[in-house]
Amino acid sequence: MAGTDETQAALVGGNEGDIVLSGSAPLPPLPLEDDQVAVSVKAVSLNPVDTKMLGGYHTVGAISGCEFAGIVTDVGSKVTADWDIRPGDRVSAAIMGMNPLRPRIGAFAQHSVAPGRCVLRMRDDWSFAQSTGIGNSWYTVAWALFHVMGLPAGPALEPLNSQLPPPVLAGPNIKIDNFGGKRTAVLVSGGSSSTGTCAIQLLKMAGFDVVATCSESNFELVRSYGADALFNHASPTVASDIRDHTRNGLRLALDCITTNETTRLCYAALGRSGGRYVALDPYNEAITATRSVVRPDWVLGPEMIGEEIGWPAPHGRKANPTAKRFCQVWNRTLQGLLDRGMVRTHPQRVRDTGLEGVLEGFEEIRSKQVSGQKLIYIL
């Protein structure tokens, strides 16, 4: 389904609270802002968050989708100087779809727009499908680990390591010296998710020992990304097994799944001295209140863009200049890792069924038919 010179095909919020394919969706607004990059979209990636745009998160007519790759068609006045991006470049981007404040901008469309700080130049040897796998996970997880959890990035992650040292956090004092002594362990709950495999790679680059949970069928996959120890999340003894493995000394946990079960697992696995728990969604406060020696927090990926978020509480918030600055420095760090071949995308299931196929993918994710893979669609 194609648009006209003034419209485009896109997946938009429908009148019944669903996502529908429109052949007459509006194009992104013009003129471009100084820091914006306009892209002809060639591939998109589907994430669980895309399936959760219901109720107050749903905006009728707003374009959905957060990750895309394509060819640059135009740039704002500051983009080339700031980010070395020009028309004709092949890029990938991470944005916020179903945005009530910018309803004409989303990934699931023939044309989209992203801030230069959220755009990466593609590797020459990567396809559009492969490149769209470097999206929101790689921004959200970095923010969670190296800011919200307060971990030092280490010398492999420059310029982030030098330009933005981790903040001093309230709560437990955790000494970390991965390059001068024994490596500190971090639990990654949900190691076979796209955020999980991203977290494992970044933690290994930063010098940490990674303990991960996932289903036993995904052990080989998660180990291939660098996990040092694996535990079956469904085992009734998983928390005690992790405590035994870490000698009751685990201090740090990243929850990539954030259900009541995974929050309880992380809290039970953390050692007697407590520590820090960071989730990628809001957590159950009744569970986190059970251990005062653990400092809980959670992150919202789109906050990294540095713009106001018009979603309902607890996700709605004002623009965060600290997150925006982190995003700017992290983009340069991630571009360097990408250029040097230091990152792997999550395993992909690539389809050439276009935007129509994305609608089918929504149902597959909702019915939990997808595990250890990311759904990619070629337009």
Image (tube, helix red, strand yellow):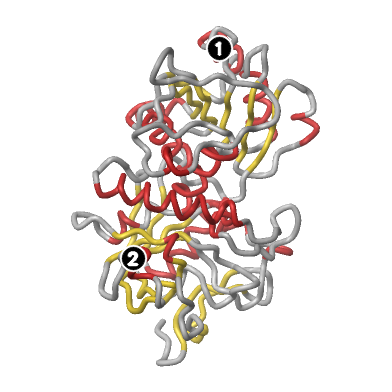
- Give the label on residue 241, or none: 1
Q: Which quarter of the figure has residue 2?
A: bottom left
Name the residue nearer the viewer: 17 or 275: 275
Q: Residue 364: x, y in percent?
A: 50, 53
Q: How many marks?
A: 2
Residue indicated by mark 2: 378
Give the class, few, some or many, for how many residues have Cα within 10 Å of label 2's Cα (few <14, many ≥20): many
Quadrant the C terminus occupies: bottom left
Q: Quadrant of residue 259?
A: top right
Work out whether residue 329 or residue 264 is closer to the camera in this orientation and state it: 329
Q: Secondary structure at mark 2?
A: strand
Left or right: 226 as drawn, with respect to 317? left
Q: Which mark is residue 327?
A: none
Question: Relative to the observer, which residue lies in front, 369 or 268?
Answer: 268
In the image, residue 339 sits, relative to residue 200, either above or below, namely below
Residue at 55% in and 15% down: 242
**Identity, as a three-letter code, of the amino acid under mark 1:** Asp
- Single out the residue that lies furthest toward the front: 163
Mark 1: give few (<14), some (14-19) or many (20+) Cα within 10 Å: some
Residue shown at 68% from the left, 63% from the top: 57
Residue 145 visible to the viewer: yes
